[in-house]
Every structure is written in structure tokens, then in C-alpha cells.
Image (tube, rainbow, N blue to C red):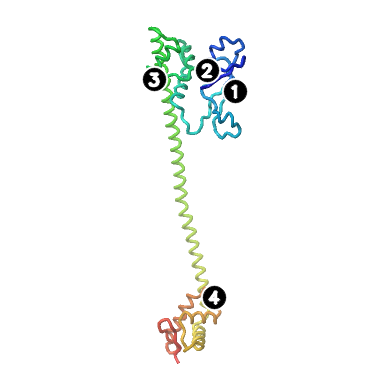
Amino acid sequence: MVFFCCDGCGETLKKNQVDGHAAKCRDCYAVSCVDCSVSFPGDDYRTHTSCISEAERYEKTVYRGVRKLDQIGNQTQPQKNKKLTPQEAWNQTIITAAESAPPSLKSYMDQLCVHENVPRKEKQFRNFTVNSLRLKGAEGERVKDEIWKFLVKVRDDLKKENEEEDARRKKQSKDGSKHGSNDKTEQMETEPKVSSVSESSDNDSAKKASKEEHTTSSLPSEKEIAKAAKKALKKAKNNKLKFKSLRKQVRESLLLKSDSKKILKKALKNVVESNPKKMVLDGEEVCLVK
């Protein structure tokens, strides 16, 4: 319920009491809304159907809502995801109808705008107009029919406009999501190409590095490896060593890098197999032949 204060005498009034008070009070040139303090000269107060909440009024700068009022006190930015109640939507329909009402119905529509509890069903609406608009008898029934048909027509037109607006927004959001998905797919298609190029370059560099390692680690000859292996076996107990231990001692004696284990393993195995009269590979152990 919206309350107003007379700017002339300061009396607090309900919305349906403003017209009666204006006829009595000589200083009533305008009324102000008690909640939002917006002044409404003349009959402008009729269009003021929604106002700020108590939280926005008293919390002021602390309030975190998004509801705002325009210069004439109407709500221009409703709260997010908040729909109008059926009665609020019906009140908005009456105000819209009053703006475009024919001259024969203009005065009746202006009187309906004052009330905030106008029934939404035809039977209750007719009973309401009997007391509020003083529509009685055959002439009253004719005016009731005209008012109700006009309100229904305006309500259907507004409903159709809202549905078209919703469909347009959904279409725009759908088109935007399609463009976004197309951009993502294009990006996903280009990314594998870039990654494949980078992978091929990494493979080439790895091959080059392996070749360099192979050349640097294969510098010792088989004679030098055989000589180092014999020397290590002679120092070992019973002239026996595990192949792994022998490889480690050969690598240390030849001052080879740790990354040459695989190459040295292959070379040492070839040396042992090519010299059966001097060394024998028995399982995991290498024995020196005396």
C-alpha cells in the first residue's frame, strides 16, 4: 500500500483518499510519496504503483539491491529474477489502458488507477465497479462491458508483446552461444596443428641430441673397453663380477658420463662375446678366463 503526504497541509493519505482531500484542501497542489519522497503534482500520483522497499529506504548506502526510481517515482530497474505478482501486473495493465483509453472511458479508467485491489476476474470486477465507480442500472452494465473488454484487449496485447520480447532475447542468446561454440571449435581445430608442429620439432631436437650423445659416448674403442674390463675382473674376488658392477667400474675407469650407460652396456656385451677366450658371460656374472 502506497501512502502520500499532502505538500500543503502535511496530512497522510491513502491513494484512494487523495482526490477527496484535494477537493477540500486549498493548499494541496501536490502530494509526496511517504517512502521515496517523490513529489507528484496534479494527478501524476496515479501512475505511482511501485516504490522502494523499507530496506532501501532505511539502509540507504548500505543497501545492496538494484531497484531504482526514475524522476516521476516509477520503478525502472526491477530486482533481478523478480517477477511481478499477478495483482501488480494487473495494476500495470490498468495504468497502461488508462493512457490509451477512449474519451468515453477515460474518467472511469483514471478512477480505477487509484485503487490497488481491482479484481482480475470479470464477476468480481463487475461487483467492484458498482461501489467504486457507481455503475448501476442498464447504462452501468453497458459501461462495465466496455471497460472490461478494453482491459482484456490491453492485457492480451501486453502479453503478446512480452512473449515476442522473450522470444527475441532467447534467439539472441542462442545465436551468441552458437558463435561462442564455433569460436571454441575453431580454436580446438587450430590447437592440434600447433601442438603437432611443436611435437615434431621436439622429436627432431631429441633425435639430434641422441645422435650427439651417441657420438660423444661411443668415443672409447673396444680395445680400451676390453682392457678396462680385464683390469676390473682381475681386482675382483674370484675374478668374477656382476655385469652391472663391471659396467660401472668400466665407466668410472674410462671417465664416461652417466648418460652413456645404455651405449656402454651394448658395447661391453659385444666385447665379452667377441673375446670368449678371455671373458665369459655366465647369466648375470662375467668371469675372467685364466
Amino acid residing under circle 3:
Lys
Q: Nearer the viewer, residue 77 or 160?
A: 77
Vertically, is 168 above or below 106?
A: below
Which residue lies at the image location 55% right of the left edge and 28% below the top edge? Answer: 54
Q: In the rendered image, which quarter is residue 126 located in?
A: top left
For label 2, the crowd category at 10 Å Cα-Cα, with few meaning under 14, some 14 to 19 and many 20 or more, is many
Per the image, the residue denoted by label 3 is: 121
Quadrant of the image containing the C terminus: bottom left
For label 4, the crowd category at 10 Å Cα-Cα, with few meaning under 14, some 14 to 19 and many 20 or more, is few
Instruction: Calculate the distance from the C-alpha at mark 2 to the C-alpha at mark 1.
Output: 15 Å
Give the image location of residue 245, x and y in percent.
48, 81
Q: Which mark is residue 15?
A: 2
> SS of the residue at dot 3?
loop
Amino acid residing under circle 1:
Ser
Q: Please tell me whether mark 1 or mark 4 is closer to you in this view.
A: 1
Which residue lies at the image location 44% right of the left edge and 22% below the top edge? Answer: 90
Q: Residue furthest front?
A: 11
Amino acid residing under circle 2:
Lys
